[in-house]
């Protein structure tokens, strides 16, 4: 299951890397190989206590193995261990980060921008909302009730007022509910989610842009999960329109460590207006400078940052450019195709209820039952039984209204329904849909037979 052939390339790359430091006096490593071996094998034993995240039968959480080129480039850079806070600490990796971020910005139609990599979507969203609070001081941040919980928590950290916006029957931000809030005149920023964590729903950005022309708020796009689907060739017309509108927002967050095939943690925040960089200005007596050019530490709330993340991302983009018809875009499209294919099989089985078809590569469903509580228990039982057959799903707790709209016979005896959830985010999932379905069918038969 764990690919190892590519490791042979690492030795060749290390020999080439070493050529760049010829002329330096030699020194011997103080580390004893046998001591390293003992500890490393212990680490391998401890790491066996994991779910099989790289395998196609793991369809639970948002876990996708890094591409071999990203893994190799990251390891190679560890012999240098660059720090992309200042140019002196990561000379080559700083320029590689700028090139990589530029390619991400261009993917969304931006040639002029300000952006950088960071530890992940949480820190990226923190920076975006921090800037939003500077641009619109004292005004409220709003996001869909299906948005990631980090937005409300970040607003608490920043001391910014926050309010949730009701979601519609597709898990998207409800436009009427949003406009009701906007009429109060105290909203500075609307967070638009491009792929919610629970259901993969995409907020209706074109309509929200129309509201902006009337109510004059900022728009921050949280595309941490779904950003790369802008390259997909099989989105619905509505979803495609939302992605095609991303160039009109004020800031975007995307996580290369999700669909971008990168190791954790690699997030990215970009701003349409480069002048927001003035909010980052600081004086520091101990920061060293060998260049008059703006260094990445001057446009980031984080100080020390791993240059290895930039090196890995740059290498991946070099191998798999972000072109509409390229291999990377094709694999993103395969992920949605796999989700739609599995959703069709689940929908055709009368024992399940799907509230809506997947917009991206996440789908949710629950067993058909006479009440929300019974459906929830059946979902938990199927989840447990599936794991015993090495099919690893996830569960989510969603508003009961999402299911009673399509299954009115279900008694809403509780506010939430526990449902099954899968993220088919590996390109290989398209080839494994039938295997996944057969296992799901078997465990469902087993669970229902026991009732």
Image: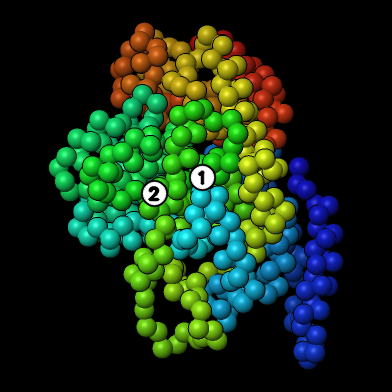
Question: Which of label 1 and label 2 is nearer to you?
Answer: 2
Among numbered discs 1 and 2, the one appearing first in the sequence: 1
The residue singled out by tag 2 in the image is 249
Name the foreground residue: 332 vs 309.
332
Q: Residue at x 60, y 60 (%)?
A: 100
Q: Nearer the viewer, residue 86 or 350?
A: 86
Helix, strand or loop at label 1? It is: helix
Badge 1, how many Cα within 10 Å: few under 14, some, many 20+? many
Residue positioned 63% across, 49% down in the render:
322
Question: Horizontal and vertical percent for residue 57?
Answer: 66, 32
| Residue 115 drawn at (x, y percent) | 47, 62
Q: Is residue 162 left or right of residue 168?
A: left
- Badge count: 2
Residue 99, above or below 58: below
Q: Which residue is mark 1?
A: 227
Q: How is the image coloured?
A: rainbow
């Amino acid at each position: 299951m764990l690919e190892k052939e590519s490791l042979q390339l690492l030795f060749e790359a290390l020999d080439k890397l070493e050529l760049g430091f010829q002329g330096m006096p030699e020194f011997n490593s103080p580390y004893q190989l046998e001591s390293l071996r003992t500890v490393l094998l212990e680490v391998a034993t401890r790491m066996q206590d994991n779910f099989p995240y790289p395998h196609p039968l793991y369809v639970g959480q948002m876990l996708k193995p890094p591409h071999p080129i990203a893994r190799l480039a990251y390891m190679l850079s560890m012999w240098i261990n660059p720090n992309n806070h200042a140019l002196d600490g990561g000379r080559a990796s700083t320029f590689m980060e700028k090139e990589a971020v530029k390619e991400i910005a261009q993917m969304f139609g931006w040639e002029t921008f300000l952006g950088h990599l960071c530890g992940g979507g949480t820190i990226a969203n923190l920076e975006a909302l921090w800037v939003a609070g500077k641009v619109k001081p004292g005004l409220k941040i709003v996001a869909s009730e299906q948005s990631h919980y980090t937005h409300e928590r970040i607003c608490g950290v920043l001391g910014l007022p926050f309010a949730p916006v009701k979601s519609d029957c597709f898990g998207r931000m409800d436009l009427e509910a949003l406009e009701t809030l906007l009429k109060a005149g105290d909203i500075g920023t609307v967070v638009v989610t491009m792929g919610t964590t629970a259901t993969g729903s995409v907020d209706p950005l074109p309509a929200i842009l129309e509201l902006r022309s009337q109510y004059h708020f900022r728009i921050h796009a949280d595309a941490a999960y779904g950003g790369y689907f802008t390259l997909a060739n099989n989105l619905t017309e509505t979803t495609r329109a939302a992605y095609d509108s991303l160039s009109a927002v004020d800031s975007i967050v995307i996580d290369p460590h999700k669909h971008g095939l990168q190791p954790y943690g690699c997030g990215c925040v970009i701003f349409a207006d480069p002048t927001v960089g003035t909010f980052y200005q600081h004086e520091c007596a101990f920061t060293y400078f060998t260049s008059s050019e703006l260094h990445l530490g001057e446009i980031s709330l984080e100080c020390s940052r791993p240059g290895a993340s930039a090196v890995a991302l740059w290498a991946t983009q070099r191998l798999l450019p972000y072109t509409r018809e390229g291999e990377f875009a094709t694999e993103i499209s395969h992920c949605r195709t796999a989700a739609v294919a599995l959703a069709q099989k689940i929908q055709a089985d009368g024992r399940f209820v799907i509230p809506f078809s997947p917009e991206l590569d996440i789908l949710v469903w629950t067993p058909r039952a006479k009440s929300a509580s019974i459906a929830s228990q059946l979902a938990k039982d199927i989840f447990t039984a599936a794991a015993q057959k090495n099919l690893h799903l996830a569960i989510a707790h969603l508003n009961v209204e999402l299911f009673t709209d399509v299954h009115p016979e279900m008694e809403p005896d509780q506010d939430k329904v526990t449902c099954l959830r899968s993220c088919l985010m590996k390109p290989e999932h398209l080839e494994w849909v039938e295997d996944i379905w057969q296992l799901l069918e078997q465990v469902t038969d087993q669970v229902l037979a026991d009732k």
